[in-house]
Image (cartoon, rainbow, N blue to C red):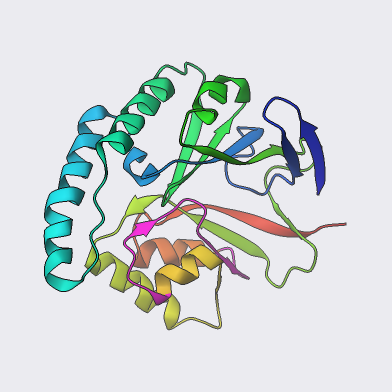
Amino acid sequence: MTVLFDSLMSKPTTIEQRSEPYYKQYHHCLIWWIPEGNMLRTMTHKDIDSNIRWRNTYLNSWRNTNTSSKLTISDQDQQRLHTVCDKLLAINSPFKKVVCNNTIWFYTNTPEDFDDVLSHEGTKLVERKQADVSLPADCVLLKNPKHKFRTYFREQYLDESQRKVIQRYFITRSGQFRPGPGFKALLQGTRLWASSYFFVDHDDEKDALFINIACPSLVRKTLPIRTRN
């Protein structure tokens, strides 16, 4: 792993192999934190207001009954989300957005398009990454691989029945699959959101086909795993 210094925002740029999701199409990744960033999963003002209304009204009503905590999104946070949403919608170059809690990964070939977003008040640039384009894009490079293939999953909301099917399928095949950290948390917990960086490692390429039969539309892509020199 190589680190380059980026003078624009005094953040080092980490050079990574291309096994990361989206590094075949995009060569840069900007990791950024914003309060209540999970409200930016869908970038429309209507959805932002609808999700905040649900959070502040219905969810907190449930929390008041079942717990002593109360988490209300402030008017300041709501306005910040709307302003940032406008800035993102104004970006003309293609990019991929991945949201996990309040942290957002932007995959892009034009990182300068995000300068105004990354410097917005009340937010924080966590890390800059850049793909090493001299490395192969269609495989996963690991120092000491234990399996032959890695299957990534689609980003999607899971209802309770889907989550239970997925948990049952993989937990009963623990010797066949090695889940990545994010997917392992889903298998062991109650979260209902599957992120696009979730994966499992396995030895048979046909495993991905059977996963999709048991859990329709879950599989995004399967890559071979190679030994990194």
Rendered image quadrant of residue 65: bottom left
Task: Report x, y in % for residue 145.
Answer: 74, 68
Q: Is residue 84 left or right of residue 164?
A: right
Q: Residue at x 21, y 70 (%)?
A: 68
In the image: residue 224, left or right of residue 125: right
Rendered residue at 32%/38% (across/down)? 77
Residue 200, x across and y down, in percent: 54, 66
Q: Residue furthest right?
A: 229
Q: Nearer the viewer, residue 131 or 149?
A: 131
Please name the residue shown 18% across and 65% down the image.
Answer: 63
Residue 148, by quadrant, is bottom right
- Against 63, residue 18 (above or below) is above
Quarter of the image containing the C terminus? bottom right
Judge whether 11 appears above or below 221 on screen. above
Relative placement, left or right, of 124 versus 219 is: right
Q: Tell me how many marks there are.
A: 0
**Quarter where residue 222 is shown:** bottom right
Residue 185 vs residue 214, the one in the foreground: 185
- The magenta stretch spans which residues? 188-205
Residue 197 lies in magenta, yes or no?
yes
Whether residue 7 appears in magenta in the rendering, the answer is no
Q: Main secondary structure of the magenta part?
A: loop
Q: Residue at x 46, y 43 (%)?
A: 98
Image spot of residue 12 (x, y percent): 74, 38
Where residue 136 sits in the image (x, y, percent)?
75, 43
